């Protein structure tokens, strides 16, 4: 957490030095501060701040990619005369255990077009999902577990 606060301090310092207080200046300052902090570390030392930053970046880029692909897939199904969808309800076994992990995963699944989180089972072992394209349940489950859930757990569990 100390590196995060130091990075924020460097970002605000950048804004003060440039006498510009917009969001673009803050982002530039944050990136420059991040690079300065990363370069100033001794070799072989990688605090959890940098590991989590990388994991968050990976999750963000993966989620944006999945979002774009699913938007086009759903849009294609809507504009074509024949429907390619095979909707079904899937029970996704959860590796996520905390309320925060389950809530973030459920929301990310729901934000992706073509899928909707419906419920979590009473024993919190499964996330119930309605999927628009589910010809093979194992493929859908593996895609979510090895994609969103794995990357989310890298962030929350370090």
Image (spheres, rainbow, N blue to C red):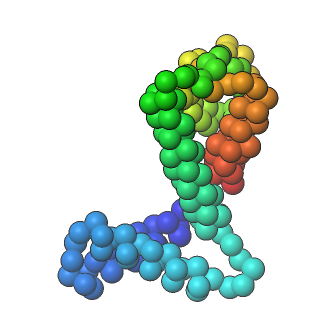
Q: Residue at x 56, y 18 (%)?
A: 118
Q: Residue at x 56, y 28 (%)?
A: 115
Q: Name the quadrant of the C terminus.
A: bottom right
In percent of width and height, residue 83 lies at: 55, 22
Q: Residue at x 79, y 29 (%)?
A: 138
In percent of width and height, residue 127 lies at: 66, 23
59 and 71: which is toward the camera: 71
3 and 51: which is toward the camera: 51
Q: Residue furthest right?
A: 138
Q: Residue furthest front?
A: 81
Q: Name the quadrant of the N terminus.
A: bottom right
Q: Is residue 31 visible?
A: yes
Quarter of the view holding residue 114: top right
In percent of width and height, residue 62 lies at: 59, 52
126 and 34: which is toward the camera: 126
In percent of width and height, residue 53 lies at: 57, 62
42 and 35: which is toward the camera: 35
Q: Residue at x 58, y 86 (%)?
A: 40
**87 sits to left or right of 77:** right
Quarter of the view holding residue 13: bottom left
- How many numbered markers are drawn? 0
Q: Is 106 above or below relative to 16?
A: above
Q: Is residue 52 visible?
A: no
């Amino acid at each position: 957490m100390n590196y995060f606060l130091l990075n924020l301090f460097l970002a605000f310092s950048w804004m003060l030095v440039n006498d510009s207080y917009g969001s673009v200046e803050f982002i530039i300052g944050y990136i420059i501060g991040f690079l300065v902090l990363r370069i100033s570390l001794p070799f072989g030392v990688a605090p959890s701040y940098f590991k989590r930053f990388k994991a968050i970046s990976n999750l963000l880029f993966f989620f944006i990619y999945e979002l774009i692909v699913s938007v086009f897939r759903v849009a294609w199904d809507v504009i074509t005369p024949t429907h390619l969808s095979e909707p079904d309800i899937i029970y996704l076994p959860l590796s996520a255990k905390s309320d925060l992990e389950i809530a973030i995963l459920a929301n990310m699944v729901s934000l992706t077009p073509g899928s909707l989180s419906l419920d979590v089972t009473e024993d919190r072992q499964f996330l119930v999902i309605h999927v628009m394209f589910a010809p093979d349940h194992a493929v859908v489950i593996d895609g979510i577990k090895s994609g969103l859930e794995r990357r989310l757990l890298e962030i929350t569990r370090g």
